[in-house]
Image (cartoon, grey):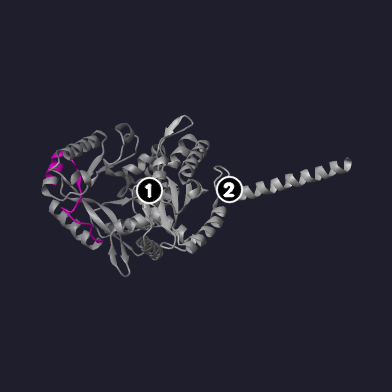
């Protein structure tokens, strides 16, 4: 009996060990949270499916699914709630795909779906997935709608290997997000060409920052009362080696996306301070130099030291430098913005809110910001006097500025009618093509001297 008992024990140990090995193997190929195949298992299964699809000439598609607004759930309810939401999403996708494909979670809020040939068109199947994910779901007693973006690539047509399909589906996903999210986009060869051109432009921009291929143009700000130019806004241009002078719209969004806006912003700050000092050394009337600060720059802990360094190297009195911050930027984190703004004010520079009227700042919030000026967004000026609503908003902003003891600058002034209205409303400073487009420093010098002579 002891012999048989020993055998039974040995067999039991072997079975347990086999189960442990099987469990370890399962964990190695499945997502711990959702139980879905992970990237390792997906790669193995997809390779087999691609061979089968090529051999039998059957269709196969790969779809990248990325949740929209998932970060909001994590930030407001915590990671446990985020995990619960991911589990619900995994179940919803799996219900639609079933045995006609593979659903895999590859990390975070990203899923990959492999769709095998079926009577139902691929787009319709994915549209059903998108619609189901977008339905309300209750997480920890709170109802959420997350939505998703989906990018699709088809085997053979858009790639023969898993890596090609993944890359192309990812490009299509990027386009879906660009389209405003909660969208589906099918890969096209044009996307690959665009991606290639974007990579080239990023590398060109990186070299441009290293070589300092940027110049500043300056748009004057005219004082209504005296007619003098009392300030300028520095606007960056890229002196591209083959394409000539490029306007900000051609490179600033890419600089923001890649983080190159931080070193580029430092270049602009340094050049602007040097130019302001140079004009003073030439005995021109001292001007306030306005420099835009991007969101990425503003969040950099080194911003205050960068500003101090630029002022010191140019030997420029801080009172002649004004940093322009967009309303939407400072409203993202009011307390953090106030702290950073007070740091900058200690240097002696002035601060202005740019594009005012497009954000959601209230009177009580504005009072807390250490500001000197409000710049009315050009969108409110463009349709004056055709749109009474814009005229009313503009007048209200001027009145608000007066209440808070802030100067008000109107941007985008292009007609005499607009200028007369703004002057009548009590706006102190005007900026726009009516007076001058952004000009290189040499032309600005002539303009400054001319307006000073007329006013004098």
The numbered dot on residue 247 is none
Q: Quadrant of residue 8?
A: top right
Q: Position of residue 227 (x, y in %)?
A: 15, 49
Q: Position of residue 399 (x, y in %)?
A: 21, 35
| Of the image marks 1 and 2, the number of the one nearer the N terminus | 2
Q: Position of residue 218 (x, y in %)?
A: 25, 56
* Left or right for 216, reference 111: left
* Left or right for 209, reference 390: right
Q: Crowdedness of circle 1 by 10 Å Cα count: few (<14), some, many (20+)? A: few
* Left or right for 453, reference 67: left
- Does residue 280 sit above or below 382 in this rendering? below
Mark 1: which secondary structure?
helix
Of all residues shown, which one is farthest toward the bottom?
242
Q: Quadrant of the N terminus?
A: top right
Identify residue for label 1.
124
Residue extent of the magenta highlight = 419-440
* Of 65 and 386, the residue lying toward us: 65
* Of 336 and 241, the residue lying toward us: 241
């Amino acid at each position: 009996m002891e012999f048989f008992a020993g055998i039974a024990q040995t067999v039991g140990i072997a079975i347990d060990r086999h189960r442990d090995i099987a469990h370890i193997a399962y964990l190695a190929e499945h997502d711990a949270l959702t139980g879905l195949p992970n990237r390792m298992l997906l790669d193995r299964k997809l390779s087999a499916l691609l061979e089968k699809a090529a051999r039998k000439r059957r269709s196969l598609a790969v779809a990248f699914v990325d949740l929209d607004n998932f970060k909001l759930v994590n930030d407001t309810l915590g990671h446990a709630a985020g995990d619960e939401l991911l589990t619900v999403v995994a179940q919803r996708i799996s219900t639609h795909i079933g045995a006609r494909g593979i659903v895999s979670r590859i990390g975070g809020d990203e899923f990959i779906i492999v769709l095998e040939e079926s009577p139902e068109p691929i787009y319709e199947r994915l549209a059903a997935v998108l619609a189901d994910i977008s339905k309300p779901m209750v997480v920890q007693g709170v109802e959420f709608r997350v939505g998703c973006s989906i990018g699709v690539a088809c085997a053979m047509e858009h790639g023969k290997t898993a890596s090609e399909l993944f890359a192309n589906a990812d490009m299509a996903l990027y386009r879906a997000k660009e389209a405003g999210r909660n969208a589906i986009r099918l890969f096209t060869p044009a996307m690959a060409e665009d991606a290639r051109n974007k990579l080239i432009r990023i590398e060109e921009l990186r070299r441009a920052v290293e070589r300092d291929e940027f110049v500043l143009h300056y748009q004057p700000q005219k004082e209504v009362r005296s007619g003098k130019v009392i300030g300028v806004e520095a606007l960056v241009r890229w002196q591209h080696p083959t394409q000539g002078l490029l306007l900000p719209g051609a490179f600033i969004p890419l600089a923001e996306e890649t983080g190159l806006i931080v070193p580029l912003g430092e270049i602009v700050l340094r050049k602007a301070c040097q130019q302001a000092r140079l004009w003073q050394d030439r005995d021109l009337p001292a001007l306030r130099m306005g420099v835009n600060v991007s969101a990425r720059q503003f969040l950099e802990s080194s911003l205050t030291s960068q500003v101090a360094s630029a002022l010191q190297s140019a030997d420029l009195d801080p009172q002649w430098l004004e940093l322009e911050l967009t309303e939407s930027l400072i409203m993202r984190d009011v307390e953090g913005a106030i702290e950073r703004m007070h740091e900058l004010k200690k240097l002696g520079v002035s601060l202005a809110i740019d594009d005012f009227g497009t954000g959601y700042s209230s009177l009580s919030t504005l009072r807390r910001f250490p500001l000197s000026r409000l710049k009315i967004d050009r969108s409110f000026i463009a349709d004056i006097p055709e749109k009474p609503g814009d005229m009313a908003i503009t007048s209200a902003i001027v009145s608000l500025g007066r209440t808070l003891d802030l100067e008000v600058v109107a941007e985008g002034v292009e007609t005499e009618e607009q200028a007369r209205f703004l002057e009548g409303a009590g706006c102190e400073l005007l900026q726009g093509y009516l007076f001058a487009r952004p000009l290189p420093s040499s032309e600005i010098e002539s303009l400054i001297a001319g307006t000073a002579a007329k006013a004098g």
